[in-house]
Amino acid sequence: MFLSKMKNVFLLLVHLALAIFGSALAKNNCQRNCGSVSIPYPFGIGEACYLSKWHEVQCHRNPASGQLLPFLPGINKTVLQINLPRQRASTPYGSIRIQMDIFSTGCGSPTNVFLKFDGNEVGDVLNLTGTPFVIGRANDVVGIGCNIKASLRKIEPRIVGCVSTCAPEARMDKKGCNGYICCRKKAPDVIGQVTGLSILGDSINTTIGRCKVAFLTDEFDRYPSSKISDPRWFYAMKHTTVQLRWSIQTVNRSSIGCSDHRCKCHNLTEYEYEIGYSTCACSSGYNGNPYLLGGCKDIDECRILNNDGRPRYCRGGSMCVNTPGGYHCVFHKNKALPIIIGVGTSFGVLISVGVAFWLYVIIKRQRQINRKKRFFKRNGGLLLQQQLNSTAGSIDKIIVFTSNDLNRATENFSVNRVLGKGGQGTVYKGMLVDGRIVAVKKSTSVDEHRLEHFINELVILAQINHRNIVKVLGCCLETEVPTLVYEFVPNGDLSNLLHHGSDNSPWELRLAIAVDIAGALSYLHSDASIKIYHRDIKSSNIMLDENRKAKLSDFGISRSVNVANTHLITEVAGTAGYMDPEYFQTMLYTDKSDVYSFGVVLVELITGEKTVTQQNRCLARDFALAVKESRLVEVIDVKLKDNHNIEQVTAVASLARRCVSPRGPKRPTMREVSVELERIRSLQLGAQPMVDSDEENEVLQFDINWDSSASTSQFQTAATSESFLLPPGT
C-alpha cells in the first residue's frame, strides 16, 4: 500500500516536470521578432507563446512601406518597442512604446475625428481600464500653434496642460518650446489608465484655419530643434510614440519561470493599478528574462571592461573571481606588507585620528557657512540688502532671519509644528526669541529666474500695513529655497469654518468677513503704493484671528503691476472653482479677475457649499442660474434660513451675481464692492437693496418664499479646466 502511494507521487512529479519542460520548450520555439522589434515573453506571437490575451502580439505588414510591425489587439495599438523590467528601483516596471495619432485642427484634411466638448477640439481617449497597462511617466503634453491650449482630459480633479501663443511679449528663445508657438508640459507622475487630449483655440488675434497640433509623447527631445515650432511638420508625421508601463496579473505568477533567488516579483500597490497585478525582474547580479524558466543568467563581472580596455572590477593587481550573483577580488599575499602596515600604524594612528577629526570639524563648519552664503546670494540676499539700504523707512519693516533663528523657532521644522500643507509649501508654527508667535512658510521649490522679481515684491508686500491683510514680517534666504515669516493668525481659515466647523457661523459674522476682505482687496487694487493683484482668492486663504476678524493671506502667485500695464501670461494659474473664466480664455489677468474670485467667496458665504463638487458642478454657475430664476431660497445655507434680515442676504446675493458675471466689464470694481457691502451691512429691515439699472440681465429682484415644499432644481454643468499645473516657484 505504501509503495503504491509512493509510486503515484513519483509519477505526479514526473508529469509536472515534463509539463514545465514542455512549456519552456514551446516558448523557446516561438517567433521572438517582428521586423526590427524584439518580442520577449510574456509577450508572444502565436498560440501558447504569450502569457495572457493582453500580451498577445500580431505581426502585421504595413501596406504602404512593407515594414513588419507588431500589433497588440488587446488595446488595438501598434507597438514600436518592448522593454523588460530592470532591478534598478524598489518596484521595477516593464515598458512599451506605442504609436499614437497626432491631433490637429486647421491643418487641411483632418487625419483624426474630433468632437466638440465645451468649445474644445477633442481627440480620441486612450482607455486602458481593465488591462495590465498604465500610462508611463516619461511623456510630455505638447501643443504647437498660435493661441491654443493643449490639455489632458479624464484625469480630474487634476488639470494638466500648456498654453502656446504668438504674442511678441511671450517670445524669449524662438528655438525652445517655452510658450511661444510651442508649449510643453511634463505629464504628472501618475496619470492612470484613462486620458485624452483637447485643443482649445483662442478667439483673440487668431487667424481662421491656422494649423494647430497637440499630442502626448515620450520622444519630444529627439525631434529636430528647427521643427518644433512647425505644426505642419508634425501634421505630416501623423503619429508619435507614447510610453506605457506593463505588468502581469498576480494569478498568472504560477505560470512564469521566476521561482528562485535569481529573480524577484513584486505585488503592485500604487493606486494607478488595480489590486491583483505584479511585476518581476532579475535580481542584482543577473540579467535576462525573469518570466522564462531559467531566464535570469549570472553576469560575469570579471569579463566586463571599461572603454579603455581595462577590467571594470578588481584593479590594483587583484584577481577577479566570479560568483553567482556577484564577484570578489583576491589579492596576492605579500609577506612584508603586514610588517609595513603595523609599523606605520603604530607611529601614525594617534596623529592621524586627531588630525582627521580636527579637519572634519573645520571642513564641516566651513561647508555649512559656504552653503548658507551660496544660498543667500542665489536667493537674492544681496539684492534685498540693496533694497533695504536704499528704501528709507522700510529697513525696520522687514527682518532677514538666519536659518538658525527659524530652526530654533520651529524646533528644526518639527512635524508637530505643521499648521498646513499646500501645493507651494508647508506652513509651520514658530516662536521667535522675543516671544512672538509667527507662521513660517517653507516653499517646496524655487524658480531662479524669478528671484529678482520675488525680492522686489517681498519689499512691497512687507510695507503693506492693513488690518485685514496678513503681515509679512521677513524672510530667510540662507536655505535652499526662500522661507517667509508671517504674523500668526490663530483661528483657522474660512473654508474650515464653512465646511468643517460647527454651526456657529451666523449671517452677521459671514457679512463682516465679506466686508473685511472686500476692504483689503480694495486697498490692494487702489490704495497701495503699487497696484497688486492677489490671483488666488479663495476661502482657504482667508484667515480668522482670535476675534474672528478676517485677514487675507497667501500671496504666493500674486503680481504687482503698473496701472497701464496689461498683464499677459503664458501659463494659467489659480484654483478650480474660483478662476475667472474670461482670464482662462484670454490669458489676461485684470483687477476684475480678483472681483470674480471674491464673488465666488460671497456665494460660498451665502450657500455654505464648496465651489466644485464631486460631480464637477460649478457652484458660481449654479448660483447665478438660481438667482436668475428667482430660486435664491433653494440655495441659501440651511443654517441661515432662520435669519430675520433676509434683505441683507438678498442684497449680497445680487452683488455676488454681478461679481461672477462671465464678462469682466459687467463686474464692479473692488472699491465699489467694498462700498456696497458696507451699505448692505447698515441695511435695515424693510429697506430695499440697491440694484444697478444697467445690469437688468445680471441683477434680479427676488420673490422670497420660505415654503418648505418648494422643489429644488439641479443645474448640471460640464467641468471647466480652470487651473494648469505651474512650474515650481511661479
Image (cartoon, helix red, strand yellow):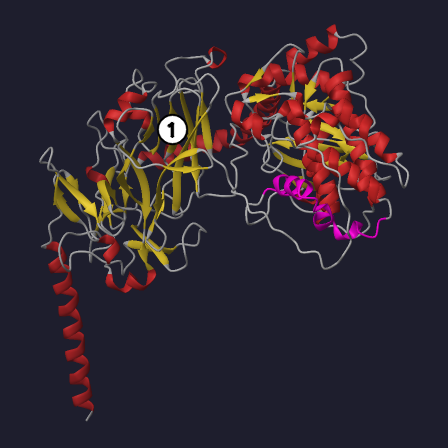
Q: Nearer the viewer, residue 389 or 14?
A: 389
Amino acid type assigned to the residue bearing label 1 in the image: Val
Magenta: main secondary structure: helix
Give residue 339's position: percent from left, percent from top: 37, 35
Q: Nearer the viewer, residue 59 or 486?
A: 59
Residue 315, visible in the rendered structure: yes
Image point (19%, 38%), residue name: 303
Question: Is-magenta flag for residue 626?
Answer: yes
Question: Is-magenta flag for residue 120?
Answer: no
Place residue 459 in its image quadrant: top right
Label 1, residues with CA under 10 Å away: few <14, some 14-19, many ≥20: many
| Residue numbers of the magenta segment | 618-643
330 sits to left or right of 583: left
State whether residue 556 is above or below residue 653: above
307 sits to left or right of 473: left
Task: Determine the secondary structure under disc 1.
Answer: strand
Quadrant location of the N terminus in the rendered image = bottom left
Residue 377, visible in the rendered structure: no
Image point (70%, 23%), residue name: 475
690 sits to left or right of 592: right
Quadrant location of the C terminus in the rendered image = top right
Give residue 131's position: percent from left, percent from top: 32, 54
Place residue 520 in its image quadrant: top right
Residue furthest to the bottom in view is 1
Image point (13%, 48%), residue name: 32
State whether residue 416 is above or below residue 255: above
Give residue 149's position: percent from left, percent from top: 44, 28
The residue where tag 1 is placed is 142
Q: Nearer the viewer, residue 404 or 179?
A: 179
State whether residue 324 is above or below residue 169: below
Residue furthest to the top in view is 390
